Amino acid sequence: MNSEIDLPVPPLCAVRPETVITKDERVVLELSDGRKLIGALQSFDADEGQIEVSGKTQDSTKTLGMHEIRLMHAPEPRLWLPDEDSLLSPSKGVKVTTEPLEFEIEFNDHSTIDGSTFGFRNGRHGIHLFPVLEGKRYTHLFVPNGAIARHRIGKQLGQQLVKDRILSERDVAMVLLEQQEKRSESLGDVLTRNAIISPAALERAVKRQERMPHMQLGEILVEERMIERAELDNALAQQKQQRRKPLGELLVARGLVTAEDIQKSLASKYGVPYVNLREFPVDYVAAKSIGSSYARCHTVLPVHRFGSKLVVAMDDPTKGEVIDALHKQTGQIIEPVMAGREDILWAIDQYNRDHLEPKQKAQAARQTRAPGPKLRSKTRAPEIMDFISRAAGEGASYIHFECQGHNRGINVSFRIAERLEHRGNITASQQTAFLAQLKTQSRFPQALAHVPQRGELTLDLGGQTRTLPLHYLPCVDGREDYVLHCLPDASQDGFEHLDLSDEHLQRLIKLSDNRSGLILVTGPRGQGKSTTLRALFEHINGDTRKAWMVGEHPFAPPPNTRQLRADAHAFNATTQLKQLASADADAAFLPTVTDAATTQAMMEFVLGGRLALASTLSPRAADALTTLLHLGAPAYALAEGLRGVLGQRLARRLCTHCKERYHPAKDELIALAAEYHAESAPRDGAHNPTVHESIVAHWTEHYADMNGAFTLYRRRACPRCHHSGYSGRLPLHELLEMTAPLRQALLDGATNQALITLARQGGMKTLKQDGIEKLLQGQTDLAQVRAACTD
């Protein structure tokens, strides 16, 4: 009997002898060099990335790497047989679709294949498709990742939302137009930034395009032999990748759909079931088949077993490497289903807490019935990762574990946007076990005594080690606090996670493309400055510039970067910056600047023709200028070296699950416009109806619907947001760029208020103005904008 080859069957298809691929089955390989190879499949090794095929003779066996093939086709027809699994049904909160999906794959040589498929499987090395023949018959097609230039499976998201009757075609068309208009760079910007053409050549091409509007700019550049066709193709591809936001994010931001609507439509698009984990009966034994740390790290949870299959809830069922890893770890065929990220994290917490082993459950029941103080530490303590995952989901920067005394319980609070919010208790019976867990996993410089200490909590997140600072703070009355710093998530790197407006993003990128100068990010503590600076650092640290991290930062260095080793006893920024300057460094990323020595060394580094990134604790962008002057930065150095200051505050984001939409009255919009205008013109901001009307008219063009109606949101309450109406944090920004008037004012010794006035006159949009615009986008409300902008 032929043995099975480790290749997947279609989603929701039964694993039967007639559906699996076996050894010696005939396959057709199209090689990267254009040749075809027909033979008998001997093995498909996903670990080694190799395919073994034998020819007519034993000596003709060949082993090919995935990079050597363009596709593999097993043409033998198979019959699609549905799984007889009654649990994957609508009665259990599952939305199932078995319709074939459209697919289109464009190869690197620009040739394409398309058709319909019974779903797909993403593997570590490529995509497995199941092209439909007549009726329920299909074949097996594998295309390696390295051969794919572009691919599409299922309908476009907009088409799927219309098909699912979630949105109208008009709504989708409007948002697609907005997405098209919000590309981060024009084609000309891409070409000039990459030094493909000169600004003068671009100007000549643009003038010709004005005379011949029917011709595309790229075609003119090629026709005039200013660029090569390959250079145009690369620039267009880069421009396409730099769209500001995906369609789904724009639709949610506009309040047209919820994140859950998007996820359900994506499930239909990909042909995988959508599972409501708050209704689905999760199989606890299945859930325990992987570790909770791995589950939280990758947002996955096994929820059901059926025959040789393990059904796994994922927020992204296209994560082929995660599916492969789960298959290898459990030895079962992984059947991905889609669920919301928050629901998966909720389910992980719920089932880790509620589903104890039988002996533990019986013990817990006896303890619940027994009166008096017999409740002891046999009740299982919650895991530290339970709190860390919840804090990450809510955008918390710190977790406070406040011990109330020996065996009196622990209060747990999260620091969210400068507010300390209570998030539950660890009971007296769990306190000893929880503290033992916390101390075991932490590294303190010495045994805990009655003195404050700073240690490190080392976590294993799915094979990745992460270290979080942990502070031990004993109190005079015998109580003690443990404060855990939740560092920025490295998976959220990049500008796309900063919620910068398109205007701010383009201007910030332009500033960071300078070869020299100082860029500051400023704001009170806990306002996400480190996350913004890390994204900037990632942007400037490339093949053409060598950037260094100096001193201690609240996160690990990004991949492929260098961090200068600090002295064991002290951090001497002056010495280190001088060393970098003499060692041909292009840029340096410093911690928060709070002393005169670091300020002076930083300005000398900048004036030497290098770029520096740093932060201050100044409340506003213009205040950072005065702060550096007070720290000893010469006015001439600041006027010459400073490129810009990004002020940043965090507001609370409205809960996407319960926020309530409404249509504001004209008076409310006029009052909002008056508050917006008062930021730029404090003296007459409340007494200029003409200006207020023009602001509302401008907003109508950008934020109203076709009938001129605005849709705003107000908070409600639901269990997902702890009945607060808010979930997560929303950054507000103001970007001060150094202009000639500002430089002259610095040299003339202008006051702080004069600098603020000049910055506003120079076009700086304030924190509150940025917040009001994000309010108009449906992301927050006016109360939170005002609270975030209060100094």
Image: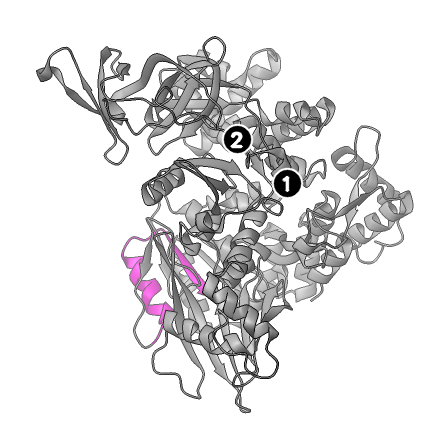
* Mark sitting on residue 259: 1
- Point out the stretch of residues depicted in magenta: 570-591
Observer able to see residue 228: no
Q: Residue at x 73, y 23 (%)?
A: 170
Check disc 2 and report its element: helix, strand or loop: loop
Which-is-in-front pick, marks 1 and 2? Answer: 2
* Number of dots carrying numbers: 2
Q: Which residue is mark 2?
A: 272
Residue that extends furthest to the left in the rendered view of this protein: 59
Q: Earlier in the sequence, mark 1 or mark 2?
A: 1
> Residue 592: within the magenta?
no
- Residue 127 appears in which quarter of the rendering? top left
Residue 543 position, x and y percent, is: 33, 41
Q: Find residue 282 and report its horizontal and vertical position in percent.
A: 53, 47
Q: For this view, does 150 lie left or right of residue 500? A: left
- Residue at 79%, 40% (x, y): give it: 711
Name which quarter of the figure residue 759 lies in.
bottom right
- Hey, what amino acid is under mark 1? Ala
